[in-house]
Image: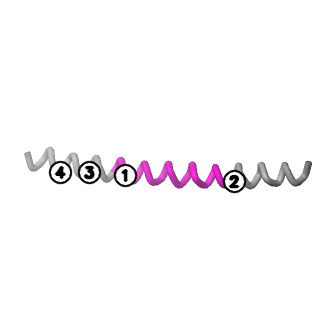
Amino acid sequence: MNRSSKGFGLTGVAIAVVLMFVTAVFSSSANSADLSAKQVVFAN
Protein backbone atom coordinates (compact mmCIF):
# COMPACT_ATOMS: atom_id res chain seq x y z
CA MET A 1 0.00 0.00 0.00
CA ASN A 2 2.77 2.42 0.97
CA ARG A 3 4.81 1.50 -2.10
CA SER A 4 1.88 1.88 -4.50
CA SER A 5 0.88 5.24 -3.00
CA LYS A 6 4.50 6.44 -3.25
CA GLY A 7 4.68 5.21 -6.85
CA PHE A 8 1.42 6.98 -7.64
CA GLY A 9 2.81 10.16 -6.09
CA LEU A 10 5.99 9.98 -8.18
CA THR A 11 3.94 9.24 -11.29
CA GLY A 12 1.66 12.19 -10.51
CA VAL A 13 4.66 14.50 -10.11
CA ALA A 14 6.22 13.23 -13.36
CA ILE A 15 2.94 13.77 -15.23
CA ALA A 16 2.58 17.27 -13.76
CA VAL A 17 6.16 18.20 -14.77
CA VAL A 18 5.69 16.84 -18.31
CA LEU A 19 2.33 18.62 -18.61
CA MET A 20 3.87 21.92 -17.46
CA PHE A 21 6.80 21.49 -19.87
CA VAL A 22 4.51 20.72 -22.82
CA THR A 23 2.24 23.64 -21.91
CA ALA A 24 5.23 26.02 -21.71
CA VAL A 25 6.61 24.85 -25.07
CA PHE A 26 3.18 25.00 -26.74
CA SER A 27 2.53 28.44 -25.25
CA SER A 28 5.95 29.65 -26.39
CA SER A 29 5.56 28.31 -29.94
CA ALA A 30 2.00 29.67 -30.11
CA ASN A 31 3.29 33.13 -29.15
CA SER A 32 6.05 32.88 -31.76
CA ALA A 33 3.54 31.81 -34.43
CA ASP A 34 1.23 34.65 -33.40
CA LEU A 35 4.07 37.19 -33.68
CA SER A 36 5.10 35.75 -37.05
CA ALA A 37 1.51 35.95 -38.29
CA LYS A 38 1.29 39.60 -37.19
CA GLN A 39 4.57 40.42 -38.94
CA VAL A 40 3.33 38.76 -42.13
CA VAL A 41 0.05 40.70 -41.93
CA PHE A 42 1.91 43.99 -41.44
CA ALA A 43 4.33 43.13 -44.23
CA ASN A 44 1.47 42.48 -46.64
Helix, strand or loop at label 1? It is helix
In magenta segment, residue 30: yes
> Is 44 situated left or right of 27 in this image?
right
Provide the residue designation for mark 2: 32
The span from disc 3 to disc 2 (Cα, nearest Å) is 33 Å
Q: Which residues are magenta?
A: 14-31
Provide the residue designation for mark 1: 16
Percent x, y for residue 18? Answer: 42, 49
Identify which amino acid the numbered label 4 is placed on. Answer: Lys
> Is 39 situated left or right of 19 in this image?
right
If you read the primary sequence from the N terminus, does the residue marked by circle 1 or circle 2 appear first? 1
In magenta segment, residue 22: yes
> Is 28 situated left or right of 6 in this image?
right
The span from disc 1 to disc 3 (Cα, nearest Å) is 10 Å
The span from disc 1 to disc 2 (Cα, nearest Å) is 24 Å
Q: Residue at horizontal 77%, vertical 51%?
A: 36
Residue contact between numbered discs 1 and 3, judged by CB atoms under 8 Å: no
Percent x, y for residue 22? Answer: 50, 48
Identify which amino acid the numbered label 2 is placed on. Answer: Ser
Q: Residue at horizontal 20%, vertical 47%?
A: 7
Provide the residue designation for mark 3: 10
Provide the residue designation for mark 4: 6
